[in-house]
Amino acid sequence: MRLIQGEKDRETVYSDAPADVARKWEAAGAEMIHVVDLDGAFTGKPQNLPAVRAILEAVGVPIEFGGGLRTDNDVDALIELGVARAIIGTKAAASPRWIAELCGRHPGKIAVGIDARDGMVALEGWTETSDITAIDLAGKMAELGVCAIIFTDIARDGMLTGPNLAATAALAAEVGIPIIASGGVSSLDDIRRLMEINVSGAIVGKALYTGAVDLEEAIRLASN
């Protein structure tokens, strides 16, 4: 399912079989599958581990997972389950020491999701806006050893209006670790523009489900 700008009452369900969808994207050439536990993001604890397990059993490509990861036990359980990359969101801003500990325990497997509204970091499933800038948080997380930053402009998420290129470019220029663009990717032209600002990758969500972007074509473009 997909939300619009992270709002729970603006959801669209595209399938009730996540593993089948994952197989479809793998068959189309996906090199990694991005999975978000939306229930976990709002409750603060992963709620859909059976679905994650089914996806892992269905495909051979790496899975990255975010949504409600706020304890050692939850992160460790995901890594043990076989998730290649655990994405920490809300707790990254509040507990940098914990992020450093996770990076030490799971090197190369801890990423941070930075979701921003007007340049400021949003927390608690995007229901609260902090006084921390996205660039400041990204810099701190890079120093602590996270393997990547997934950057989402909330205003663009699910809107198919194109990513926030200026904000994404500013982040990529300031932070010396991979930046993955998320939110608003709606066309192959968006992917071309993201390639020009030197991001490491792009997460395409709603545009795949509506058919606005063909994954095979997008991968061929990004591979050139």
Image (spheres, rainbow, N blue to C red):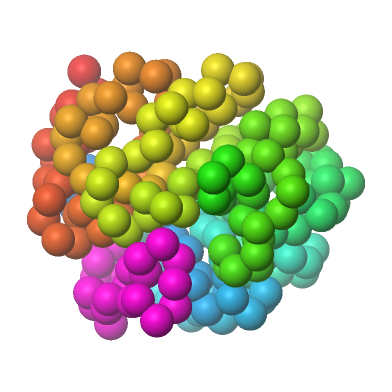
Residues 205 and 126: in front is 126
Q: Please provide the residue range marked out in magenta.
A: 1-25
Residue 97 vertical position relative to residue 38 in the rendered view, above or below: above
Report the residue at 35% width, 39% height from top. 163
- Split into 4 quadrants, where in the image is the N terminus? bottom left
Residue 116 vertical position relative to residue 223 in the rendered view, above or below: below
Looking at this rendering, what residue extends furthest in the right direction? 97
Camera sees residue 200 = no
Residue 168 vertical position relative to residue 5 in the rendered view, above or below: above
Report the residue at 84% width, 53% height from top. 95
**Residue 169 drawn at (x, y percent):** 47, 24
Q: Is residue 20 magenta?
A: yes
Camera sees residue 74 = yes
Residues 179 and 46: in front is 179
Report the residue at 23% width, 25% height from top. 192
Q: Which quarter of the picture shows residue 148? A: top right
